[in-house]
Image (tube, rainbow, N blue to C red):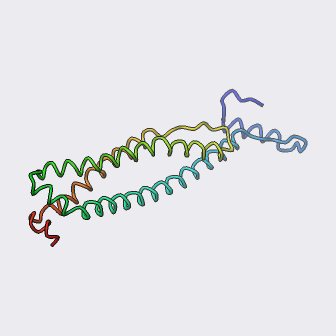
Amino acid sequence: VDYKTSYHQKTEQEIRHLLAENKAIDLESKLARYQEMSSSESQIKGMGSILVGILILFATINFINTMTSSIYSRVREFALLESIGMTKSQLRRMVVNEGLYYWVISGILTGGVGSLIAWLIFRNTNSYPMSFLYPWGSLVIVLFLTLILCIGVPLLVYTVIGRKPVIERLAGI
């Protein structure tokens, strides 16, 4: 039976009422399948959001740790560059550029490889006739927040180590 209005609850109930006593007719409802699919979609989105949140947290902690270690291990190098004429502004720009390199690389990996993996997972787990919709808005927001992180962390760490006098940094005190 085709409805004039797709997925109409009242029409569904009327047909079920008319066919309730007839045991010879097996009733399969598009509306029921749609509701099941909607429930399944919500569960998948929820699990995916939790997984993405955990991965973002781990990646953020890893990036902060990597940049902090990288800059702290080069305290003497930065002090030497400063002692031969490089300004603090130039050093800040250098560490910010390093953060931007990380951002570009992570953006390429996320946009390219990550998108391919997401599509493959969707294709292999999709049991309903749903189309793959790419979350462009979420990607732009995450890339923007990542940009802020990739600029802010190196800048903050360099600002902290750059407060000591050059002589102390050269001596490794």
Count of labels in the image: 0
Left or right of residue 150: residue 21: right
Image height of 58 relative to 130, above or below: below
Which picture quadrant has residue 155?
bottom left
Left or right of residue 29: residue 126: left
Which picture quadrant has residue 129?
top right
Image height of 10 relative to 72, above or below: above
Image location of residue 61, percent across then percent down: 37, 61
Question: Could you tell me which residue is drawn at 63 percent across and 42 percent down?
Answer: 123
Question: Could you tell me which residue is drawn at 19 percent across and 59 percent down?
Answer: 77
Image height of 155 relative to 19, above or below: below
Going by the picture, which residue comes out furthest to the top?
A: 4
**Which one is in front, 171 or 30?**
171
Going by the picture, which residue comes out furthest to the right?
A: 24
Image location of residue 93, percent across then percent down: 19, 47
Specify the quadrant that holds the C terminus. bottom left
Image location of residue 132, percent across then percent down: 57, 38
**Which one is in front, 76 or 51?**
76
Specify the quadrant that holds the N terminus. top right
Image location of residue 86, percent across then percent down: 12, 51
